[in-house]
Amino acid sequence: MKKCVSRLMIFVLAMAGMGGLMALAAGPGAVVINEVAWAGSNDSSSDEWIELYNTTGAAIDLSGWYIEDDASTVYRIGSGVIGPRGYFLIEDNEDAINVAADAVIGLSLANTGDSLVLNDSSGVQIDAANLSGGIWPAGNLTPKASMERVQPGGDIWASAAAGNGALGSAGSVILGTPGSINSAFEGDGSKIYFENQGGGVFAIKADGVKDLYAYGVDILYDPARLKYVEAENGEFLGSDGVATSFNAAMENGSQGVLLVGGARLDGGTSGVNGNGILFKLHFDVLDGGAGGLKFGAASFAADVDGDMPIIFEGSESFMSASGGNSVLNFEIIPGEQRYSLQLQWDAPGGGAESYRVEKLLNDGSFASLGVTTATNFVDDRSLVPGVEYSYKVIPINNGADGAAVETKAVDDRGIRGDIDRSDRVDGRDMEKLARSYGSRNNEEGFDFLGDLNFDGMIDGKDLIDIGVNFGLVYEE
């Protein structure tokens, strides 16, 4: 059976090319038992494997490390290095699964439960799983699901809810995620996800990321419903001015699987934080049925140290841009209260169960303001007088998005620079601006009301707006 080359092997080769492996000693919790396929696969109960995960930002030498099984059986790792935030697969036999093993060790995991203790070469306990030795806390015989850790640093386990494309010894689909992020992983708030922008355009966005340096994703789609046209690089990865590299191509030139990658070109010294668009994909929509995009198993994101734990959020449903599935007569009028805008529209010809309202933020991305079943919505969240805001309304039916309709509006009822809403621009407004001066969107202390020109930064331009209007009093 053909084996896949793991990113760990690529890492090891790269480090060797730089003059040797940078593998370090480790303490408790540095490497954890992250996933256990104690039930094997539908092909064979011998298709067992154990996945280790490096929780640190440095490579760790596992030579001589061993796992005690019920304190009576020892699975010893002869040699091997686990990359920073990387995975290390111990497989029962070379053909247990179609993901390359980092170590092949004859495993014998009892269906009734075992105690597994990971020790370093000196016998120091690094981690343990099911220490009591009782029934496994997760995993199943039917279906043959692996046991996954919900958080690498915790002791809560769950049965795998999805696979990553791995296959068993005879080709059955593995319900587990060997060599990639667990399907049960609850995350740290960071994710990469799809946003349907209508008309066959999908934005792939990062949310809450920390120190993002590079990414590589496989985008899977139904070529009977979508035809890939082009990819458009986003600004987020290089939003601080660092040059980036971006590539996109269909796998082997065929529709159905799209490979996209991006990286910062600063020698691996820094990443970016926050939210933004990584790239956009443009498709021709071939029919009006609901379908979806999803991330492939090889998708990853990396910070300056290596792979980072991050959630790639599921499939994005879509509907054809044709067929009357966009809202009609979308308009925006001043809300009843100052500093508010009322959005209103008519239902699409085919109707809709609900509507998602999105607003363009000052980082260039659209964010959801909420979902409503009504055909109107009021935005009264931190509006600045005189700033033009863009909104989208997207109808939803059976969980599938229709085409987005976008329009813009301004609320002029007030004075730009009246940050404290006192109807006068004065020293109080200068004080409030000063307290957030120099901050950027998504940074602590940033005040949306002080970003008077809506550029995502509170700086001298906002001071100019206060200076121009200083002393003015608003009169209705």
Image (spheres, rainbow, N blue to C red):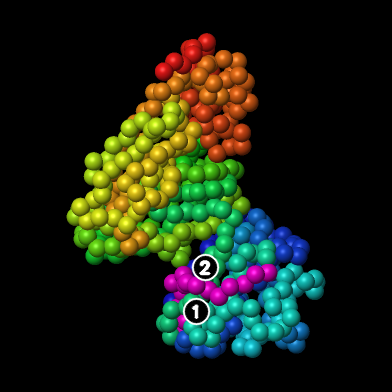
* Range shown magenta: 155-169
Position of 218 with respect to 85 (left or right) is left
Q: Nearer the viewer, mark 1 or mark 2?
A: 2
Residue 183: mark in rendering: 2
Q: Nearer the viewer, residue 108 or 284?
A: 284
Residue 173 lies in what quarter of the image? bottom left
Give the structural element (helix, strand or loop) at label 1.
loop
In the picture of the structure, the residue carrying the numbered disc 1 is 97
Residue at the image point whose x is 50% and y is 79% from the top: 97
Closest to the observer, 211 or 449:
449
Image point 27% across, 57% down: which residue?
319
Quarter the N terminus occupies = bottom left
> From the viewer's perspective, is residue 309 above or below residue 156?
above
Q: Quadrant where the C terminus lies?
A: top left
Query: Is residue 307 among what the camera can see?
Result: no
Mark found first going from the N terminus, 1 or 2: 1
Residue 377 visible, this angle: yes
Q: Relative to residue 77, is residue 265 depicted above or below?
A: above
Q: Nearer the viewer, residue 239 or 436?
A: 436
Q: Residues within 10 Å of mark 2 (few under 14, many from 20)?
A: many
Q: Nearer the viewer, residue 157 or 281?
A: 157
